């Protein structure tokens, strides 16, 4: 099959390149897969700025959406979208590290797919209400309420295999845990620090809290936590939440 020509910089690499930055929750999902499967030497991580940034002609030739993460293979094949990348890494390196794709039953895989789908379809598209702007205060308030609803939905998914272990599929982590965890780092940081969730993200969500503690205790999970949290703290230092209007919005108590 013919494949469209790719920029020379993409095709010249001798191993896959993951274009990503530490604060990206979607990119962190792929990095967590890499860490669990011990692929740090098999995949190179580069900042998109090394080829001009997300909106550069070179980057857009690789991913017309202008978003990250993006995985570019040595032959020039560009794979955007974090779930696509995560599944590719698991398939391409099935003989390395944990599977992360539960094999016990189709039901268990379906539950992982469900958790991932809820996250990707209903949380990721609105997560920007926690840290972007300007936007109408009503839009921000509605978005935060919608996130709270989805936290309850995911809590229900967490209960399905809770008797077997703290992870989405039970005793062992999966691609679903990798999808959820970095976004929960965002929510734990932003909602408790800026939106008045004084009791935290896990109030009345005990299975999610148990899962969160297990992910924080996991060596690779802790590594990703530090990467994402470090990026969020840089946002704090730069005054991002004041600049985008979050600080002003929450003064009226709607959140």
Image (tube, rainbow, N blue to C red):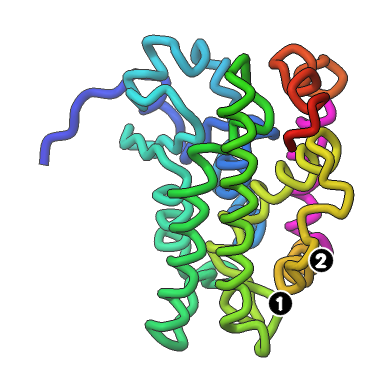
Residue 223 in view of the camera: yes
Q: Quadrant of residue 113?
A: bottom left
Residue at point 84%, 29% (across, down): 233
Secondary-structure class at tag 2: helix
Q: Is residue 93 above or below residue 119?
A: below
Q: Position of residue 26 (x, y in %)?
A: 56, 42
Residue at point 47%, 81% (across, down): 108
Residue at point 69%, 16% (across, down): 244
Residue at point 66%, 83% (across, down): 162
Circle 2 crowding by C-alpha within 10 Å: few under 14, some 14–19, many from 20 = few
Circle 1 crowding by C-alpha within 10 Å: few under 14, some 14–19, many from 20 = many
Q: Is residue 189 above or below residue 11?
A: below
Q: Position of residue 90 (x, y in %)?
A: 47, 61
Secondary-structure class at tag 1: loop
Q: Are marks 2 and 1 in contact (CB under 8 Å)?
A: yes
Residue under label 1:
166
Q: Position of residue 55 (x, y in %)?
A: 44, 13
CA distance separating discs 2 and 1: 9 Å
Residue under label 2:
213
Residue 41 in view of the camera: no
**Residue 233 included in the magenta stretch of the image:** yes
């Amino acid at each position: 099959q013919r494949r469209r020509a790719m920029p020379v910089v993409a095709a010249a690499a001798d191993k896959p390149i993951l274009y990503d930055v530490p604060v990206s929750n979607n990119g962190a999902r792929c990095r967590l897969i890499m860490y669990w499967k011990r692929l740090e030497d098999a995949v190179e991580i580069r900042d998109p700025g090394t080829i001009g940034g997300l909106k550069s002609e070179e980057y857009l030739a690789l991913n017309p959406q202008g978003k990250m993460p993006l995985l570019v293979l040595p032959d020039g094949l560009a794979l955007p979208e974090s779930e696509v990348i995560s599944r590719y890494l698991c398939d391409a390196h099935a003989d390395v590290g944990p599977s992360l794709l539960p094999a016990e039953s189709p039901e268990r895989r379906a539950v992982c797919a469900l958790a991932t789908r809820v996250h990707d379809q209903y949380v990721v598209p609105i997560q920007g209400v926690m840290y972007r702007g300007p936007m109408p205060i009503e839009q921000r308030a509605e978005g935060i309420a919608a996130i709270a609803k989805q936290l309850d939905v995911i809590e229900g998914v967490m209960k399905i295999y809770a008797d077997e272990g703290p992870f989405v599929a039970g005793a062992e982590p999966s691609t679903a845990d990798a999808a959820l965890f970095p976004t929960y780092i965002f929510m734990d940081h932003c909602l408790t620090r800026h939106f008045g969730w004084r009791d935290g993200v896990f109030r009345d969500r005990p299975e999610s809290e148990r899962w969160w503690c297990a992910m924080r205790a996991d060596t690779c999970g802790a590594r990703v936590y530090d990467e994402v949290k470090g990026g969020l703290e840089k946002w704090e230092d730069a005054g991002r939440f004041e600049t985008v209007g979050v600080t002003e919005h929450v003064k009226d108590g709607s959140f």
